Image (cartoon, rainbow, N blue to C red):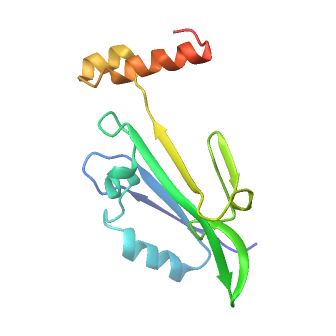
């Protein structure tokens, strides 16, 4: 079995404890990782792309892709979501691009809804509380 070199990098943002572990099969690759991410240069997703992280200040994120024909060598390879994948999935959904006409838009939204007492304590909108009650009434879940 080939030797594996593990490298661990902590987020360089002050006070953040997130870390990443990378695996390399060659020493040269490991050295390259240390040049790029060593000395606190690596940043976790919270600090490198905070707009992509759900929070009380950013409670809703939406991702939209469109199905379109993908060509290779002048030949159609079929429909792909955003030109990248013929199939996509996430929590609660799965979708094959070929099951829909070209130009179909797939919009996936993630939203966090804190409990009512947390909304009041953090000064967050009470819209979340009312929305949660409405959803519970529709589904018959206890409130």
Question: Toward which corner of the image does residue 73 lie, by quadrant?
Answer: bottom right
The correct choice, above or below, for 138 with respect to 63 in the image is: above
Query: Between residues 38 and 85, which one lies in front from this camera angle?
Result: 85
Residue pictured at 28% horizontal, 24% vertical: 125
Question: Toward which corner of the image does residue 142 lie, by quadrant?
Answer: top right
Residue pictured at 48% horizontal, 17% vertical: 134
The residue lying furthest to the bottom in this view is: 73
Residue pictured at 62% horizontal, 75% vertical: 25
The correct choice, above or below, for 52 with respect to 24 in the image is: above
- Residue 12 lies, in percent from the top left, at 30, 57
- Residue 135 lies, in percent from the top left, at 52, 20
The reply, left or right, for residue 91 in relation to residue 19 is right
Query: Between residues 7 and 83, which one lies in front from this camera angle?
Result: 83
- Residue 68 lies, in percent from the top left, at 61, 69
Question: Toward which corner of the image does residue 6 lie, by quadrant?
Answer: bottom right
The residue lying furthest to the top in this view is: 142
The reply, left or right, for residue 20 in relation to residue 44 is right
The reply, left or right, for residue 89 in relation to residue 118 is right
Q: Quadrant of the N terminus?
A: bottom right
Query: Between residues 120 and 9, which one lies in front from this camera angle?
Result: 120
The correct choice, above or below, for 139 with respect to 81 in the image is: above
Query: Between residues 49 and 10, which one lies in front from this camera angle?
Result: 49
Residue pictured at 27% horizontal, 16% vertical: 120
Report the number of numbered marks: 0
- Residue 81 lies, in percent from the top left, at 61, 63
């Amino acid at each position: 079995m080939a030797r594996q070199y593990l490298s661990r990098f902590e987020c360089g943002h002050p006070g953040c404890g997130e870390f990443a572990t990378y695996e390399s099969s060659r020493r040269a690759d490991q050295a390259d990782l240390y040049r790029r991410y060593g000395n606190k240069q690596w940043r976790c997703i919270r600090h490198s792309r905070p707009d992509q992280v759900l929070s009380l200040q950013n409670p809703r994120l939406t991702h939209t892709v469109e199905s379109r024909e993908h060509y290779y060598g002048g030949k159609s390879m079929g429909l792909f979501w955003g030109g990248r994948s013929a199939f996509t999935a996430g929590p609660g959904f799965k979708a094959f691009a070929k099951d829909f006409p070209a130009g179909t838009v797939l919009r996936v939204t993630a939203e966090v809804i804190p409990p009512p007492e947390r909304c009041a304590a953090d000064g967050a909108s009470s819209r979340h509380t009312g929305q949660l009650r409405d959803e519970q009434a529709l589904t018959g879940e206890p409130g």
